[in-house]
Amino acid sequence: MNKLRLLNRLERKRTFNQFTQGKKKKAFGILIYLLSLWGYFWIGGLLPIFASMAILDSKGEAGAFSVSVVLNDAGTLSSMDVMALAFFLASAIIAFIQIRNIYFNDFDQSTLWSLPVDTRLILISKNTGPAVFSLPLVLAFTLPSMILTYVATGSLIKAILVLVVFFCANQLGECLGCFLRIFSAKGGSRLQLSKGVKSFFGFLLFVVFMVGFYTELARDFKDLVVFMGFYNRLPAAARPVSFALNHHLWLILVFVLLTGIIYYAFLNYMAKHFFTIGESLAPRGTVKAVKGGDYKVRRKYAALIRKERQLFFSNSAVAFNSFFGTVLPVILAAILFVPAVKEMFLGFLESQSFVSPDAAIFLILIGLAGMMNLAGFGFSLEGASAYNTYTLPLKGQSVFLGKLFMAASLIAPAYIIAWLLLIINLRPDLVYWPFYLFGPLAYALFINGISLFFDWKFANYDWTNPQELAKNSKQSFFSGLGSLLVSFAILLIGVGVMTKAPLVYAALLTLIFVAGNIILYFLTRDITVYHQ
């Protein structure tokens, strides 16, 4: 037990270091963790909360009724089955992707594997050690379902049992995901996908989610009521959680025992083949360091942009987290071609009394432009090889602008496509067209410049895992929350000013953003980018 206690302590420290980037910034790490809890709570509440709201809305306002009776009669507890299944699948996907980081990370290979410790204890510590961080995340995801269960049944015990079911679903998903990754690794390189293909599938899933979410939002989530009614009519075997909650609570104990048996089998299999699995999951093959096109002579900024673009997309975690903000305006503009979504959006523009519909579109585009932030990691992405860039015979401003121009080379095409889709679909007043184009573009470039300047000032070259840099660093915090606060301030002021002079305010904002970019250019003329 003393060895397990020590291993648990090591795992807790390693897990918390993912939030603090290995530095003693505990307050910042705690803040990032709290934001993660909020994200899990919001995601976990999507289906059960919206389903219950849609069911209550479908009852109308005719007479008084009991919320618990309505939700219970409507079979809302069936959403617990759907959420448990979704949590199980999400846990399986995460474990499939993160198995090397969980069980076979660099620290284990260099330290734990050489210690005279039973392999089972190492594997158990991977689950029990970070439990102080993982259990609150499971609770945050489950809390909306627990609240809905308590309202529908009035039983606190059943609400607690829902938490037990979700915890078991999470554990079973991790076992399944790890097994699938192990067996796929044994299958050789046939199942190995490039980072570009993985990013494409992730982007495709995100687009499907956005289209489905906004379509349902436009339809007041009526399809959820229909789906829950259909799901509630399925046999009991297809909805075991709600069946157990309504009739046979002892089935949950069977589910817990089944989870324990599967985890025990997983533990023994991993312990028996631990080193073999670790070797099969090790990266294979080599990447060609110099390609044919690399020998081509290019102009200074063309070469820097190409180099920065390769650096950006080679760190898939950073690219995955920040590039979505760039393509989001394109996705939303395309979703507006869905008749129900377009009708809902136009209804919102007409119903709000703050500004004219055309002025409201300008403010919305400004807000979306604030999310197109790709340059926030420009300097930190250099990592330990930063000297390769900083020893080039270039001025500091040239390096700075090369990173900024790379972001602009991706942002401008994406936004122009969104602008064209918006013009074709909504056909706003012609006088707003240039402001729709140049105002948000200038703002996006300005936000990227400020974020890049912040990253230059607080560059972090000591990271080892791109995921830590992308999710749990000052750069990610400033790039996300900082640009959001600036955009919110602009929108708040705009709602008050654009009621009287919308065109003047749009023109003034565009000129301010352009002037801000010019000022930033002169501020960086004598910048020194060498690592200090």
Image: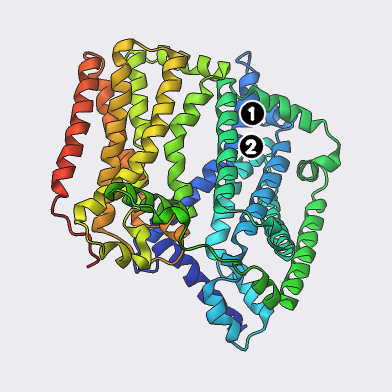
Front residue of 15 and 415:
415
Residue plotted at (28% across, 40% down): 447
Residue situated in front as seen by the camera: 102 or 255:
102
Write the residue at 15% across / 40% down: 519
Asked if marks 2 and 1 touch (Cβ < 8 Å), the reply is yes
- Quadrant that contains the C terminus: bottom left
Q: Is residue 173 visible?
A: yes
Residue 218 place in picture, x, y as percent: 56, 21
In the rendered image, residue 160, in percent from the top left (x then y), is placed at: 66, 51
Residue 462 showing in the rendered view:
no
Mark 2 Cα within 10 Å, few/some/many (few <14, many 20+)? some
Describe the element under mark 2 as helix, strand or loop: helix
Give left or right: position of 403 versus 168. Answer: left
**Residue that carries the numbered disc 1 in the rendered image:** 67
User: Relative to 311, is 487 above or below?
Assistant: above
Quadrant of the image occupied by residue 5: bottom right
Q: Nearer the viewer, residue 432 or 143?
A: 432
Q: Amino acid at mark 2?
A: Val
Q: Residue at horizontal 33%, vertical 13%? A: 356
Q: Which label number is shown at residue 40?
A: none
Q: Which mark is residue 151?
A: 2
Its colouring scheme is rainbow
Image quarter hosting the N terminus: bottom right
Q: Amino acid at mark 1?
A: Val
Query: Horizontally, is 449 left or right of 97 in the view?
Result: left
- Horizontally, residue 12 falls left or right of residue 21, namely right
At horizontal 76% and vertical 72% (from top left) the residue drawn is 269
Q: Earlier in the sequence, mark 2 or mark 1?
A: 1
The x, y position of residue 122, in whole percent, is 63, 77
Q: Position of residue 256 (x, y in %)?
A: 76, 59
